[in-house]
Image: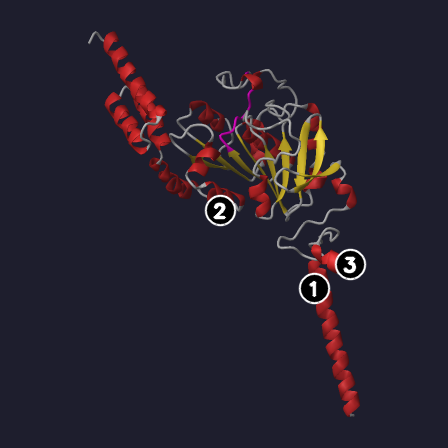
Amino acid sequence: MDVLHRGVTTCAYLCQLCWRLESLRIFFSKFPVELEDSPIAARYPQLSNNFEVVRLFPQVHFKPYSLSMFSRTVILKSGLQAEQAEIDGYLIDFHRGNADLVVTFESADHTIDRANPLRDGWSVSFLARRGYSVLCVKAASADWYRNAALHRWFRKLRPFLAHFDRTIFTGSSMGGYAALVFSQVAPNSVVIAHNPQSTVDHKFVPWEHRYPLGWVQDWSGDFSDAAGVTHLARQIYVTYDPFEVNDRRHVDRLRQDNITHLKMPLLGHGTPFWLQQLGLLAETTEKMLDESLTSLAFAKLIRVRRSIPRYHLMRAGQLMKSGRYQLANQAALTALDMAPGAPEAKEMIAKIERSWNDRGEREGR
């Protein structure tokens, strides 16, 4: 009887152990990761045929055909590995991560080294460190992504996007425009657009004269005007300076009920740069990515802009335009106190004085 009891106990223990191992296998199989380059595989090669390993951030499993749109694997300047496609001069990098995909677009910034195919895509290091899957679209030129081959590629992207729980589109200025218009390929997506254009088609925005490279593009066809497609997104975050008239006009053209307005008064164009200068870029981006940032919370955070000369210089300019020269001069002097010797502050003070004198001559003072 003793032997029988021990045998039954042992069988029960083994059954329980097998059940637990199977449960673990099923759980981990949701997040498979190739072992071919891992140190675990190097030390224990037998594991690669029997088990799957989870890294710090579980990765998405792709069927073999689902990555066929990428033609090569590359190591970028930062050391990140990417699957890369080339579409008529555009480079598209894919970085595997978790079940949230962030699609990023470059701006028209002239400092981008567009000749380097191994440059990092916009915001990829920030996003990859936080475990996101990232698809970076790197433009061959500041053409506002007006390319028929690229448009065809995006129209075929839906099966690929189906692997992800959420899709988020993001970019700044020209990249913000692209984030808005290309989000239509993933209805119910999230968009994070920094001072975007809605379009640069003069048929719709005859007042937009800042981007001559955008004017000359062919604006016929798909992905040409964000105003007609942003209703498809679940949530849109837009950062902009409401005193930057054309930036505000572009935002006003968009459907409003799914937009969270993140206003940055008197900082001008280039809002990601100023968020970074204020030490707010990482915090606010993380909150936008998890869809928890509100306009009110952002308004409280952005009050810190009063601590930098830029805000006071922009304020001085606005006050000068409205004819309040004394207040304008005080604002410019505040900027000069914050940054002694700053040429921008000295130039603003001289400009205010010239404007005051010109007005006096016109009024016969």
Three-letter residue code for mark 3: Pro
Across and down, in percent, residue 109 comes to 54, 26
Exactly how many numbered labels are in the figure? 3
Which callout, 1 or 2, points at the residue further toward the start of the chain? 1
Residue at position x 73%, y 53% in the image: 35
Mark 3, residue position: 45
- Does the rendering let one see residue 318? no
Which callout, 3 or 1, points at the residue further toward the start of the chain? 1
Rendered-image quadrant of the C terminus: top left
Across and down, in percent, residue 264 comes to 41, 34
Residue at position x 29%, y 32% in the image: 337
Task: Give the quarter of the image for residue 312.
Answer: top left
Residue 199 is a magenta residue: yes
Mark 1, residue position: 24
Which label was assigned to residue 292? Answer: 2
Three-letter residue code for mark 1: Leu
- Does the rendering let one see residue 341? yes
Q: Nearer the viewer, residue 104 or 27?
A: 104
Three-letter residue code for mark 2: Ser
The label nearer to you, 3 versus 1, is: 3
Q: Nearer the viewer, residue 217 or 206?
A: 217
Across and down, in percent, residue 284 comes to 47, 42
Q: Nearer the viewer, residue 278 or 104?
A: 278
- Residues rendered magenta in the picture: 194-202
**81 displayed left or right of 244:** right
Which callout, 2 or 3, points at the residue further toward the start of the chain? 3
Q: Residues within 10 Å of mark 1 (few under 14, many from 20)?
A: few
Q: Give me the C-alpha separation between circle 2 and circle 3.
A: 43 Å
